[in-house]
Image (tube, helix red, strand yellow):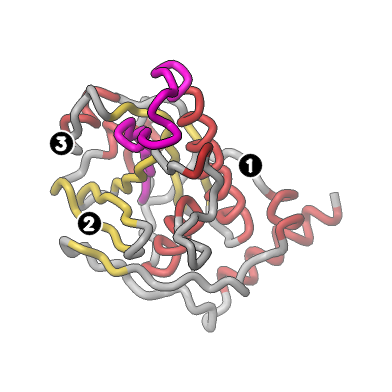
Amino acid sequence: MKRIVYLMATISLLTSCNDVPKQTPLTMTDEIVLTAPDTQSGLTVNEALALRQSCRDYSSEELSLEEVSEVLWAASGINRADGKQTAPSALALYPIQVYAFFAEGAYRYEPAAHTLVKVADGDYRQATAMQDFAYTAPLNLVYMANYAKYTGRGADIPHERRWFLCGQDAAGYAENVNIYCAGHGLKSITRGSAKPDQLLEILHLDSTQYEFVLAQTIGK
């Protein structure tokens, strides 16, 4: 218990210090160029694991550019010269497409360029969840399966197996975000509920190619 109290105090100190370099306002342009992750920041992995929990109470305080950048990088950013990502993927096909929903619009994350590309103007956070707390939290992530990625070695995998593998991949993405948030003074929760038909329409996605897998809420 004393250890947990100490870790919570450490997070409070980290997030309250004026010299913490995570304060750039997020400007909602058509394409948001994200910042490179600070791989030396935050608590240790074990400290973050000790603090990880699902939260259902969020303020409307916006996240900074640096926080959004590192959340997206934690989910599915490129971390090696060969283009592979922070989270594992069965057969390294990476069929999960990450979308970020803000009050101002919905964006598609492009890992290779480390950018967010706007796909819809307006506040569509209600489509990402079935719980009220997600409707006002600053960021909701949606993980969509893109079955067109199943080519080459994955071409012979049947649909029901693809769905299972996409669930595994999305869970890895989401848990990366959970651990990042726990280690950097942010809150998060992984959710299986959303409004899939609305999401497909908002994101202009073909229902024969894309399917909702998981969602996640991030904030303070």
Tell me the kind of residue under disc 3. His
Q: Which residue is mark 1?
A: 53
- The mark nearer the N terminus, 2 or 3, is 2
Q: Quadrant of residue 40?
A: bottom right
Write the residue at 49% across / 41% down.
57
How busy is the neighbourhood of tag 3: few (under 14 within 10 Å), some, or many (20 plus)?
few
> What is the secondary structure assignment of the residue under circle 3?
loop
Q: Which residue is mark 2?
A: 117
The residues colored magenta run 139-162
Report x, y in % for residue 65: 37, 68
Query: Which residue of the protein is positioned furthest toward the right in this rendering?
Result: 2
> What is the secondary structure assignment of the residue under circle 2?
strand
Residue 165 part of the magenta segment? no
In the foreground, 62 or 199:
199
- The mark nearer the N terminus, 1 or 3, is 1
In the foreground, 116 or 27:
116
Tell me the kind of residue under disc 2. Val
Q: CA distance from mark 2 to mark 3?
A: 13 Å
Q: Which residue is mark 3?
A: 204
